[in-house]
Image (cartoon, helix red, strand yellow):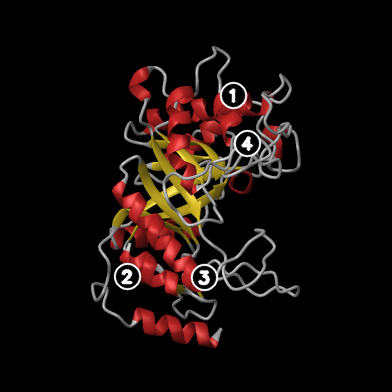
């Protein structure tokens, strides 16, 4: 940690404008607000970050049922002080904040595990509206991250690959669609300029991207409302638009044009909704050694090169709203050595090649 503090001091010793990349809406990042009490926003400013991503866990903020759930001042709510800090710092550096909301408290779902959806989709929407009132400068709202994984969202029955979903399997996406649509309406009532990000798939999933999109349907048969489609297109190949598709209804970064066509076909009706932008919430390439999270890893040089390619594509294709990199630092060591070296910086604060690729992007 001494090395980390020294590295941070070197980074923070730069004047805020010195060598900083211009903030870009195309560049988003997940990362710490502070490390050992030291703000990380000067680093984000140096990198040209335009959007700082932050997760708000409903089950953590509202472990007890609020008497007045639409009121963010209800004493049952325990809002994270760290987020207030992040929003204040982001404002100083001209960085927007995006909030991802997920997980449900036991009083709403009837289950102790927060991955279970609330019994009433409107309860989630009411919390989203309360969060919007609590953080009135935030305009980007992501509804439940990667609900296509059974580890993240229930009820969800895994599909049979390359087959349509059965009636029982469709229950999960139908429930999520109601949560998303109710949240869209609630967030728009608070601020008409709120932008709601839905779908929130990733490359594969226990339900494939294609089957999820096909089955995002409300009881009236229509797709849920959203402003952007969220997707985490993790990939073990060099980013390029096109090439052989992954198949099976999956979509990595190279399959983004295919994903766009699926969005237009199944979610873009009525027709004026075709062309919905894609919000890449999470993307990175693990480096250096095997890890517990992915079945591949690449060299630091390759990760930097691929990140540069991805950012060039994102800048050049208006269909993609932003690319969210995760995260700023490598993970701490694990006893089994399978930690994920995902960062733009090493754990001690040294700049990896990806740092410079991100900054140039």
Q: Which mark is residue 273?
A: none
205 or 296: nearer the viewer: 296
Looking at the picture, does residue 192 appear above or below residue 220? Answer: below
Q: Earlier in the sequence, mark 3 or mark 1?
A: 1
Nearer the observer: mark 2 or 1; the answer is 1
The percent position of residue 15, horizontal first and vertical second, equals 26, 78
Mark 2–mark 1 Cα distance, whole angstroms, equals: 42 Å
- Which residue sits at x=66%, y=35%? 207
Seen in the picture, residue 253 relative to 272 is either above or below; the reply is below
**Which one is closest to the eye, mark 4 or mark 1?**
4
Q: What kind of element bears circle 3?
A: loop
Q: CA distance from mark 3 to mark 2?
A: 15 Å
Numbered mark located on residue 215 in the image: 1
Return the disc, 4 or 2, that comes first in the chain's sequence. 2
Looking at the rendered image, the quarter that the N terminus falls into is: bottom right
Q: CA distance from mark 4 to mark 2?
A: 40 Å
Nearest to viewer (mark 4 / mark 2): 4
Mark 4 or 1 closer to N-term? 1
Pointer 4: what residue?
A: 248
Q: Secondary structure at mark 2?
A: helix
Q: Are marks 3 and 2 in contact (CB under 8 Å)?
A: no
Please identify, in this view, whether the residue under mark 4 or under mark 3 is nearer the observer. 4
Q: Are marks 2 and 1 in contact (CB under 8 Å)?
A: no
């Amino acid at each position: 940690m001494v090395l980390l503090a020294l590295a941070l001091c070197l980074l923070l010793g730069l004047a805020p404008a010195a060598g900083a990349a211009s903030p870009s809406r195309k560049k988003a990042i997940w990362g710490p607000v502070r490390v050992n009490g030291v703000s990380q926003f000067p680093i984000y400013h140096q990198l040209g970050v335009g959007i700082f991503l932050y997760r708000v866990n409903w089950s953590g903020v509202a472990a007890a049922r609020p008497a007045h759930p639409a009121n963010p001042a209800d004493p049952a709510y325990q809002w994270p002080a760290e987020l207030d800090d992040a929003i204040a710092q982001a404002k100083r550096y001209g960085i927007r904040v995006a909030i991802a909301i997920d997980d449900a408290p036991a009083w709403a779902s009837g289950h102790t595990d927060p991955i279970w959806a609330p019994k009433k989709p409107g309860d989630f929407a009411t919390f989203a509206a309360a969060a919007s009132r609590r953080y009135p400068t935030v305009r980007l709202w992501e509804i439940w991250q990667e609900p296509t994984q059974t580890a993240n969202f229930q009820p969800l029955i895994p599909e049979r690959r390359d087959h349509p979903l059965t009636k029982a399997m469709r229950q999960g996406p139908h429930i999520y669609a109601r949560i998303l649509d109710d949240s869209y309406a609630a967030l728009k009532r608070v601020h008409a300029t709120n932008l709601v990000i839905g779908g929130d798939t990733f490359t594969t999933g226990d339900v494939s991207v294609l089957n999820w999109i096909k089955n995002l349907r409300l009881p009236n048969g229509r797709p849920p409302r959203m402003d952007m489609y969220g997707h985490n297109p993790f990939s073990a190949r060099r980013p390029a638009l096109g090439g052989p598709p992954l198949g099976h209804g999956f979509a990595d970064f190279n399959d983004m044009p295919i994903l766009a066509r699926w969005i237009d076909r199944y979610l873009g009706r009525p027709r004026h909704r075709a062309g919905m932008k894609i919000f890449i919430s999470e993307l990175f390439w693990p480096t250096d050694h095997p890890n517990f999270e992915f079945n591949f890893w690449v060299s630091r040089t390759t990760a930097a090169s691929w990140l540069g390619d991805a950012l060039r594509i994102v800048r050049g294709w208006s269909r993609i709203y932003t690319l969210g990199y995760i995260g700023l630092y490598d993970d701490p060591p694990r006893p089994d050595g399978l930690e994920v070296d995902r960062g733009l910086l090493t754990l001690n604060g040294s700049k990896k090649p990806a740092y410079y690729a991100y900054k140039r992007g």
